[in-house]
Structures are given as structure tokens and as C-alpha cells.
């Protein structure tokens, strides 16, 4: 998108919210910068919710397209990141509800579901002192996240990976903080069984 | 009473100060809740080791995004022009008829009789002016009584 220029020099100091207002005015360079800023997090979050590289690329790009097309509807009183996360998470959850359900059914019916999910875990970066057991535990935990309910999965990914506070997760999921706490509590409760088995 | 439902919120600092103090006090005297807290802590620290997601080539990613942005917006199936719906309807009817034919295999003799009767009506089907006037949604019923339509059309 380097060819998208408007003659206006945009710097990293411009806030996301200001960039979004420029996108609403069809400033292609502003959109370019917004994408560059958020592409990594968007793709990673979509990957964590979808566990598939092609789907993550497709859905995260779709989220940026929605931003471009609906930027005029962005309210200045909200944070851009919250608004964008909401678009992205909703797209991911919709995608999972609709897409490839027959594949998931087939995978689970033949009893290979767990193995398949485990194989799809990317390798974690082994830090100093990181044992094989810890890596396996992380892989098993993330595999189990894949089997949580959509809302629980979204809440735990936003908390553990994106490090969002409960209040912001509530804004993204459009629910109360108390509901987020329940989602997190149930998700952690389900995942604790894995820790107990170790 | 065990504050089990508040342990995750305790770990994520999502409790109000008074609630937090109450849970902390309970933890001091309850081994069961301390064990649950440690398990929850292990879960959250395990998840904090975020997997290294294999990233795409970002230049290509943005090029694809730009291509999608410049492509015409795909309309939902119900917003597409009628021919697509008509084609879908015809395909649906064909599938239903094929399935019925599969389940209700009739004797060859009976099929031959029907073919003979259809052949007898063929001149009526060739009256294109009659057929052209038929509304798509009425066609099955109309074709069934095409002989009467043909008489009336004369």
C-alpha cells in the first residue's frame, strides 16, 4: 500500500483515533499507517481465535476493510483499539460459527480432534530455563482454549494474550464487567483440569 | 463459603478493594482455595507464554488487502440479480426430482406409458407463446394443466 499517498506526511505521533478520522475522509495514507500499526496484533488475535493461518489472514484483512468502510461511524469518545477489537472478535466468532463446521465435526468424530489441535500449535519461543514440560503445558492449555465456548475463548485470549483489563474486554464483547469475570472464571476452571492432570 | 468464583478476578486484579481484602483473608485460612488459586495461577502463567504465531509476509498481506479494498463489493445471495436465484431454484427442483426418482423407482412399463403420454402433449409444449407467458412460480402447476391452457389460448 505504499502507493497510497495523499501528500500529507503522517508520523507515528498521530493517534489511532485521529488516523481513523482521516480514513473516514478517505485518506489512504492514514489507512496505510493504521494497518501497519495494527496488522501484527490483528493477525495474531485472529490466529489465536481461529487456529488457522489462512482464516486468520482472511478475517483480519476483512476487519481492516470494515474499518475503511465504516470509519465515518467511529465515535471519537471510544478508543480505536476497542472499536477495532470488537469488529475483529465478532468477525472471528462469526467465522467459526459459520465456516468449516463439517470439517470440525469430521475431525472430532474420528477421535483425532485433540491430536489435530495439538499439531496446529505453533512452537513457543523457548526462553532461558524453559523446560519441555512447560512448553507442553502451554501447548495443551492453548489447545484446550480452542474447545472453550466462543465468549470464554475470546475473553481468555483478550486477557492472556492481549493483556486487556476486564473493563476493556467488557467493551469489546459488549457485555458487563461481571459477565467478563464469569467468562474468565469458567474458562480458567475448565483449563485447571489440565493443570491438575500434570 | 468459598469465594471460588472470585479467585480468577483476584488473580487478574479485577476485584474492588473490599472484595479483594475479603478473598485474601479467606485464602489465609482455607487450604482448598489456596490450591485452587495456585492452579488458576498456573493456567494464567501458562497462557501468558503466548505461542509464537507464524506471521505472514506483511508486504504481501497489505497488497492482498489493497486488492480486496479495490475489488467490487460482493453482494449477499439474496441481493444478487434474479438469474442466480432462478438458477438456484432450478437446481433445487432438479435435485428434489432426482432424489424422488431415486427413492421411487417405478416399473419400466409405467415409465414407458408416461413417456408416451408426454409425447402426445408435445405439440402443446411447443406452443412457446403459451409457455413464455407463464410466471416462473406458477409454472409447475400450469404445465401440469397445459392442455387446458392450450385450449383457452386458442
Image (cartoon, coloured by chain):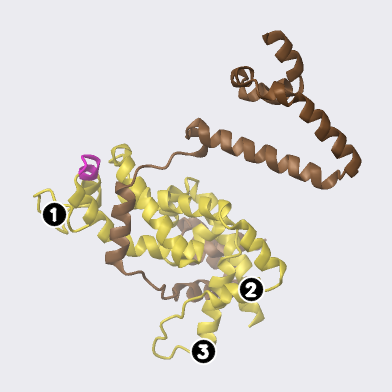
Chain colours: A yellow, B brown
Q: Look at the numbered disc 3 and give the secondary structure of its residue.
A: helix
- Name the subunit of mark 1: A
How many numbered discs sit on the rendered protein?
A: 3
Asked whether, in this view, residue A155 is left or right of residue A87, the answer is: right
Residue ID at (61%, 72%): A192
- Would you identify the image quadrant in which residue A189 lies? bottom right
Q: Nearer the viewer, mark 3 or mark 2?
A: 2
Decide which of tag 1 and tag 2 comes sooner along the chain.
1
* A107 or A134, nearer to the observer: A107
Spot occupied by residue B144 in the image (x, y as percentages of width and height): 76, 23
Residue ID at (57%, 51%): A98
Q: Quadrant of the N terminus of chain A?
A: bottom left
Q: Which residue is mark 1?
A: A10
Pointers 3 and 2 in contact (CB under 8 A)?
no
> Is circle 3 on the same chain as circle 2?
yes
Q: Can residue B30 be seen in the rendering of this structure?
A: no
* A42 or B74, nearer to the observer: B74
* B60 or B106, nearer to the observer: B106
Decide which of tag 3 and tag 2 comes sooner along the chain.
2
Q: Which residue is mark 2?
A: A114
Spot occupied by residue A149 in the image (x, y as percentages of width and height): 60, 57
Q: Look at the numbered disc 1 and give the secondary structure of its residue.
A: loop
> Is circle 1 on the same chain as circle 3?
yes
Magenta residue span: A21-26
Query: On screen, A81 above or below A116?
Result: above
Amino acid at each position: 500500500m505504499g502507493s497510497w499517498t495523499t501528500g500529507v506526511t503522517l508520523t507515528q505521533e498521530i493517534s489511532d483515533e485521529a488516523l481513523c478520522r482521516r480514513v473516514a475522509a478517505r485518506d489512504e495514507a492514514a489507512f496505510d499507517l493504521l494497518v501497519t500499526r495494527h496488522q501484527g496484533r490483528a493477525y495474531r488475535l485472529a490466529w489465536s481465535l481461529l487456529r488457522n493461518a489462512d482464516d486468520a489472514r482472511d478475517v483480519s484483512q476483512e476487519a481492516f476493510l470494515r474499518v475503511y468502510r465504516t470509519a465515518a461511524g467511529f465515535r471519537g469518545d471510544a478508543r480505536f483499539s476497542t472499536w477495532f477489537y470488537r469488529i475483529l472478535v465478532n468477525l472471528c466468532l462469526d467465522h467459526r460459527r459459520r465456516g468449516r463446521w463439517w470439517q470440525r465435526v469430521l475431525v472430532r468424530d474420528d477421535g483425532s480432534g485433540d491430536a489435530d489441535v495439538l499439531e496446529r500449535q505453533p512452537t513457543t519461543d523457548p526462553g532461558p530455563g524453559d523446560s519441555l514440560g512447560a512448553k507442553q503445558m502451554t501447548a495443551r492449555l492453548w489447545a484446550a482454549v480452542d474447545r472453550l465456548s466462543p465468549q470464554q475463548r475470546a475473553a481468555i485470549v483478550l486477557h492472556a494474550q492481549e493483556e486487556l483489563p476486564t473493563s476493556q474486554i467488557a467493551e469489546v464483547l459488549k457485555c458487563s464487567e461481571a459477565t467478563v469475570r464469569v467468562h474468565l472464571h469458567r474458562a480458567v476452571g475448565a483449563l485447571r483440569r489440565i493443570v491438575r492432570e500434570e | 463459603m468459598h469465594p471460588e468464583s472470585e479467585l480468577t478476578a483476584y488473580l487478574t486484579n479485577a476485584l474492588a478493594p473490599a472484595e479483594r481484602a475479603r478473598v485474601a483473608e479467606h485464602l489465609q485460612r482455607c487450604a482448598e482455595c489456596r490450591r485452587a488459586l495456585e492452579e488458576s495461577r498456573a493456567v494464567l502463567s501458562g497462557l501468558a507464554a503466548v505461542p509464537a504465531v507464524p506471521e505472514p509476509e506483511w508486504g504481501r498481506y497489505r497488497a492482498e488487502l489493497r486488492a480486496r479494498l479495490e475489488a467490487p463489493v460482493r453482494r449477499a445471495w439474496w441481493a444478487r440479480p434474479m438469474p442466480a436465484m432462478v438458477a438456484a431454484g432450478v437446481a433445487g427442483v432438479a435435485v428434489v426430482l432426482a432424489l424422488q426418482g431415486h427413492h421411487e423407482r417405478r416399473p419400466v412399463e409405467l415409465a414407458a406409458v408416461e413417456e408416451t403420454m408426454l409425447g402426445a402433449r408435445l405439440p402443446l409444449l411447443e406452443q412457446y407463446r403459451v409457455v413464455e407467458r407463464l410466471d416462473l412460480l406458477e409454472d409447475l402447476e400450469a404445465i401440469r394443466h397445459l392442455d387446458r391452457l392450450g385450449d383457452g389460448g386458442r
